Amino acid sequence: MLQDLADGAVLFALQNGAKYCDVRAEKIKSNSFLLENGQVEHFSIRAENGLGIRLLADGAWGFFSISNPKSMDELKDGIINAIKSALHYSQTKKQKVKLAESKAHVDTVVHSMLKKPATEEMIDLALDCDKIIRARHRIHKSSIVMHYDEFHKYFANSEGAKITQIYDDTIANLSATANESGLSETVSTTEGGRGGLETITGENNVLKRAESISEKADKLVDAKPVKEEKSTVVMNPDFVALLAHEILGHPSEADRVLGKEMAWAGGAWWAGKLGTKIGSAELDVIDDPTIKSSLGCFKYDDEGVLASRKSLVENGVLVGHMQSRETASLFDTTPNSAMRSAGYSFMPLIRMACTCIGPGDWNPEEMIKEVKSGYLICDMKVPSIDMMRYNWSISCQYAQKIENGERKELLRDIIVMGNAPEFFNSIDARGNDFTVRPITNCGKGDPMQIMRMGNGGPHIRGIATVKSIGD
């Protein structure tokens, strides 16, 4: 039914004055629950379906979305109003929209899944995680949220594209909070990816992660803060994932390079600097939606463009941006599968899929052994970035002092600060390890769209300012 309506909507839009039209027909079913301190607080089951209809008329966009449509008659007024809106806007639009060429694909893609999660099985797994987390007497709160979501997406456009994509996401969010003498410390983790139960029981096993966050939270109540200093830092892959997301991924989105997202810290300090050295030769950056099991994995984006690995920075030189068909026309380049939306009710935006710093040649332990005095920075927490993604500060969940190549005492409540070009140029080593981490809550756009994606990289070493929260 939805597929037939999508095809019909494309034809109707063209018959009524649209020069281009694409339609996303989506069915989504989401299952989730929250477990706190061994008790299931609530279950949530959400199912919805609908169409998102995007069209061009006289070089301006129009958009209409509808939930649970049953017939073409329900679509016609909305499509006609979207065309009228586009024609009205086009009268004052200085630069008319042009779309770069893109092949119209006809394809059906079913992403692989080894084991479909059952609710009872996920609850049992969550209860086991909870027992592990609360086994230490100073842990006073355990919180576990698990999701299993099913997606069926169909894309059609007026150029002949007809693409079906079916996939599942399985996600677990775990946190452990320890308390003693009025001091509370929380350590958390997000695990999972595109696929089934194997994404949280395989390599990134949530039982092992439950043990790890419980141990760290317990130890952190005895840890000390740090005095502010500019120092050598070795960042672990989980922390690097957020760094790559905030100061490499977002400013590589072409709409932000063009200054069209300034209301949401949406600029890019390197606008106009393609072909310019912006970091050391140790900085390589990619965005790759073809990385299997990443939450940003797909074969076609929401414009029907075939997924491709994008080089953004090579040997410290800025070489590319993430492009839509519209921005690719402005940059005189090719679209590179960067358009996605949070659902059928939103217009697609340029969004990173899986932005990562590429691996290097160093053994991470050898990177640490070379540090006379510095810090091992571990696991992402909260970012704060300026409008141009130039100055940044990111808190970590914990750190360790490094002295004469050895890890020393555990440190808590740490913020790492720097500016983008200075930090990028300070990077002198990248680990030969490489990890992609799940990001589930990236916000962009107005109205705000919350998206899932992957980010990652290896251990990296550079120079930044380290300080304690509240200093």
Image (cartoon, rainbow, N blue to C red):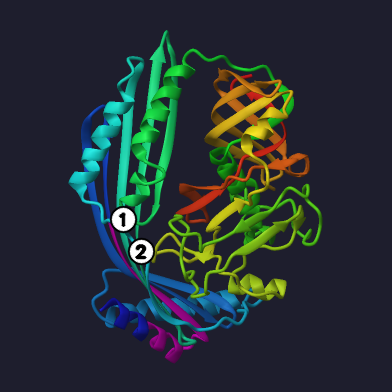
How far is the residue under mark 2 from the one under mark 1? 14 Å
Question: Is 111 displayed left or right of 410 in the figure?
Answer: left
For label 1, the SS is strand
Residue at the spot x=59%, y=74% of the render? 325
Residue at the spot x=43%, y=33% of the render? 188
The residue lying toward the viewer, choosing from 283 and 182, is: 283
Name the residue type under label 2.
Ser
Q: Does the magenta stretch include residue 25?
A: yes
Q: Mark 1 points at which residue?
A: 149
Q: Name the residue under label 2.
A: 112
Q: In this view, does 378 lie above or below 15?
A: above
Residue furthest to the bottom in view is 15
Residue 89 location, x and y as percent?
57, 74
Question: Is 62 displayed left or right of 274 in the figure?
Answer: left
Residue 382 location, x and y as percent?
54, 35
Q: Is residue 81 above or below residue 408?
A: below
Residue at the spot x=57%, y=76% of the render? 60
Q: In this view, does 270 lie above or below 108?
A: above
Number of dots carrying numbers: 2
Name the residue type under label 1.
Asp
Residue at the spot x=43%, y=11% of the render? 182
Q: Does the magenta stretch include residue 28?
A: yes
Residue furthest to the right in view is 276
Q: Do the residues labelled 2 and 1 touch (CB within 8 Å)?
A: no
The residue lying toward the viewer, choosing from 369 and 439, is: 369
> In which quadrant is the N terminus drawn?
bottom left
Residue furthest to the left in view is 120
For label 2, the SS is loop
> In which quadrant is the C terminus drawn?
top right
The residue range painted magenta reads 9-29
Nearest to viewer (mark 2 / mark 1): 2
